[in-house]
Amino acid sequence: MKFLLVTAVALLSTVVAAEATPKYSLPGDSPDGLYVHEADADGNPKNTHVPDFNITERSITRSAKFARGSSSDQGIVTCKNQYVLNYDDMVTAEQGLDGWYQTGGSFSGKSTSYKWNSAVAYGCNYGKGQTINGNWLAAQWALIAQNCGTSSPGYISFPQWKAAYGVDSSGVGFC
């Protein structure tokens, strides 16, 4: 009985560790812009750059929508306060992902991100498919900033939706 319990605990630990390991990352020298992430035929991470979507003409000044918080009691904010992000890069990455989903959109079986210089904003899909819009995303970035600080990486997870949204340094794993 003791052996069975130890084996079960060891197996559970392995499964939990595997789920917590970030699946995707974008090296710092990756092109800026929108990415779609999925597993290839062998189950390895695959990052696909969408080259025609770029917001270089947009301002990096936070708009009023970023100042609003959200009363989302469904999401769980997690802060990664080990380092500070470049504020301008972070805001531009967040606005890039907002821009892609501004009028609404969905992703299923894949995850998505927008990289700008040293920062990446991302949306992770863990199984149910996600339908979002830019204003909703902006509210999530505001919640992360309220809880983690205006230049700190973090994410908000929605276990019931099998999803997470966050911002981090490019080169660091996510999803």
Image (cartoon, grey):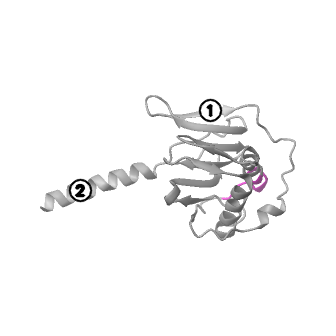
Residue drawn 58% across and 38% down?
37
Q: Position of residue 38 (x, y in %)?
A: 54, 37
Residue 155, percent across and down? 60, 58
Q: What segment is highlighted magenta in the picture? A: 84-91
Mark 2: few, some, or many residues within 10 Å (few <14, many ≥20)?
few
* SS assignment at label 2: helix
Q: How many badges with numbers are in the image?
A: 2
Quadrant in the picture for residue 50:
top right
> Would you name the residue on which mark 1 appears?
48
Amino acid of disc 2: Ala
How far from the left and from the top, in percent, is residue 90?
A: 73, 53
Q: Where residue 9 sits: x, y (%)?
A: 26, 58
The foreground one among 100 and 7 is: 100
Whether residue 42 appears in this view of the structure is: yes
Q: Which residue is mark 2?
A: 8
Nearer to the camera, 91 or 95: 95
Given the image, on which type of amino acid does mark 1 rest?
Thr
